[in-house]
Image (cartoon, grey):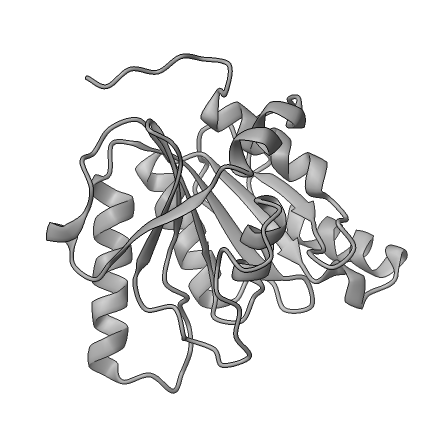
Amino acid sequence: MTPPPSSPSSSSPAAAAKLLRQARYIDSIHHPSQLPPDGGIEVAVAGRSNAGKSSLINRLCDQKSLARTSKTPGRTRQLVFFELDPMRKLVDLPGYGYAKVSGDLKAHWQGLIQGYLDQRQALQGLVVVMDIRHPLKDTDIQLIEWAGQRGLSQHLVLTKADKLSRSQWMRAVDKVRGKIHPQVGLQAFSATSGLGIDELLAAFDRWYQPHMNLTAP
């Protein structure tokens, strides 16, 4: 895969946890013209439909229903913005890879996601969410490689690790690690048990720099 820039290194999760608990919904974007001003720091969360993206966001922000969870793949059809403070946002990207949506809708999602990832200057990092039992599908690989070419820092999260034994999820992580660039962040995670939450928060701490006082340009 294309070598990306260094992913966030280990950091203290406490400041990021406090910041993320402040998350509040502010808008759902269906078209690039609706995007908020391009400033501050944004981190986006992407993943295949039903990979556990909404559950991850809820656990990360310590809020039970901040992001909608559904057993119906493909339900999130817009960019959902959450404000942490006036200069920091979390962005929930539309789920991708669900076969039953129409071709026109797929094209719309792809255009919206690609346009945001390619042009957004505030975007500092991308979390790619994958079911640990089915990682690195073609669409995942395409996103990871494209984001690497764009020069975007990435952190890959293998969700639903509670569905496997410790030895199984460790082998799954090792297998994925052997297929990606060594500078890409990678971890196992469970929204149910909390496995990996501190490691994930440390990545967000590095991106958001909570101790830094940011001002609008």
- The single residue placed furthest to the left in the displayed view is 33
Q: Residue 35, percent across and down?
A: 19, 47
Q: Residue 181, percent across and down?
A: 55, 40
Residue under the image location 64 percent in, 22 percent down: 11
Q: Quadrant of residue 182?
A: top right
Q: How many labels, in total?
A: 0
Residue under the image location 63 percent in, 43 percent down: 186
Of the 4 image quadrants, the one containing the C terminus is top left
183 lies above or below 113: above
Q: Residue 176, percent across and down?
A: 65, 53
Left or right: 195 in relation to 186: right
Residue under the image location 60 percent in, 63 percent down: 135
86 lies above or below 164: above
Q: Quadrant of residue 84?
A: top left
Left or right: 55 in relation to 6: right
Observer-nearest residue: 172 or 155? 155
Residue under the image location 28 percent in, 74 percent down: 106
49 lies above or below 153: below
Observer-nearest residue: 184 or 95? 95
